[in-house]
Image (tube, helix red, strand yellow):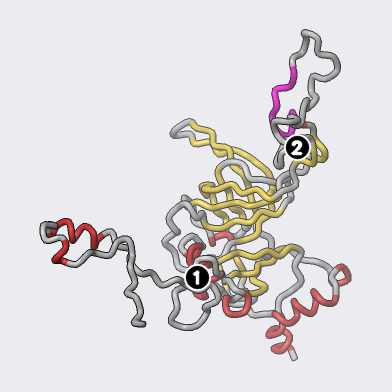
Amino acid sequence: MPPKPAFTALSLPPRFLCPTVPRSFVRAIHSIQPTPRTRTDRFNHGTGLPVLGASKTAAFLRKEAMLPLRTGALAIKKGMTAIYDPTTAKRTACTVLQLDRCQVTGHKRRDAHGYWAVQVGCGTKEARNVTRAERGNYAAQGVPLKRRVAEFRVKDAAGLPELGSIVTADLFQEGQYVDARADSRGMGFAGGMKRWGWSGQPASHGNSLTHRAMGSSGASQGSGSRVHPGKHMAGRMGGEQQTVQCLKVLRVDKENGIVVVHGAVPGPKRGIVKLQDAIKKPWPEVGLSVGVAKMGSTAEALESTI
């Protein structure tokens, strides 16, 4: 028996069966026919295949346009002050940040780690307070011991300074915008009114000793006899990383390592703040080597003295 021809709902009848069908209607039928699509196999990772949307490569390409071109710096929050402009008679609140022996201590490469990043350390630490594993890591990189270490994502390998380079305050220019990241002040266990800004229950009319209480945490039958995830309750407040974006740089003092930014910065005094170029503003039109002074590593200095 010969094979039967495949029949679909949108296949056209022979021309002699419908001679009065206009050509425009035939073109319309052809236009609504489903186009064959090649289904991408989620296990295909070879060469010449389209990049899977759920892969790490696709995620990196989506974030690539928002990654800064150069590294950032670690600064110590010294406190807040104000700058008075006698011309405009305006008082601008600002935060004073200071860089303390900020130095490049390592690199993260995409071929080995999956992303580009610069590891920056600041401060110093006594050797007796550092584990042998950490001392060995610093010795392998040829940099001195650091109190705090953080990573700054960059776009590509062009934003990786040399190991041992000193990051100075002139990395940031007056007038540019930066993003500040720091851990907020820890408040401990706080009630709902302080933590979430509740207005509280009525002060009178039958209310007794429940003025600042939470009240009901959920319904019975209507919500499934449960407490919905994310319900605002009393709990630990603060102590989490917060980011303040688009802070304008007002003053820069390279010799003292001072950077003054407009507005408030998260965290208490003497806290560590991560500063980097703002991702929602145009990148500063400066070279990638500005504010990064090349300095010989500790290993090179020891070899030269021998």
Q: Position of residue 136 (x, y in %)?
A: 79, 80
Disc 1 and disc 2: Cα gap in Å?
38 Å
Q: Amino acid at mark 1?
A: Leu
Residue topped by disc 1: 52
Q: Assign a secondary structure to mark 2.
A: loop
Q: Residue furthest top?
A: 205
The quarter of the rendered structure image containing the C terminus is bottom right
Q: Position of residue 44 (x, y in %)?
A: 52, 78
Q: Assign a secondary structure to mark 1.
A: loop
Q: Is residue 198 left or right of residue 135?
A: left
Question: Quadrant of the rendered structure where residue 122 is?
Answer: bottom right
Q: Residue at x 88, y 71 (%)?
A: 128
- Residue 2 vs residue 161, the one in the foreground: 2
Residue topped by disc 2: 227
Question: Quadrant of the rendered structure where residue 224 is?
Answer: top right
**Figure check: 163 above or below 97:** below
Q: Residue at x 54, y 66 (%)?
A: 54
Instruction: Kindly indicate whether the residue at mark 2 contacts the one at mark 1 (C-beta within 8 angstroms).
Output: no
Is residue 198 one of those drawn in magenta? yes
Q: Residue furthest front?
A: 1
Q: Does residue 9 appear anywhere in the picture?
A: yes
For label 2, the crowd category at 10 Å Cα-Cα, with few meaning under 14, some 14 to 19 and many 20 or more, is few
Q: Position of residue 152 (x, y in %)?
A: 60, 64
Q: Does residue 70 appear anywhere in the picture?
A: no
Q: Is residue 200 left or right of residue 251?
A: right
Q: Earlier in the sequence, mark 1 or mark 2?
A: 1
- Residue 40 vs residue 140, the one in the foreground: 40
Q: Range of the magenta residues?
A: 193-201
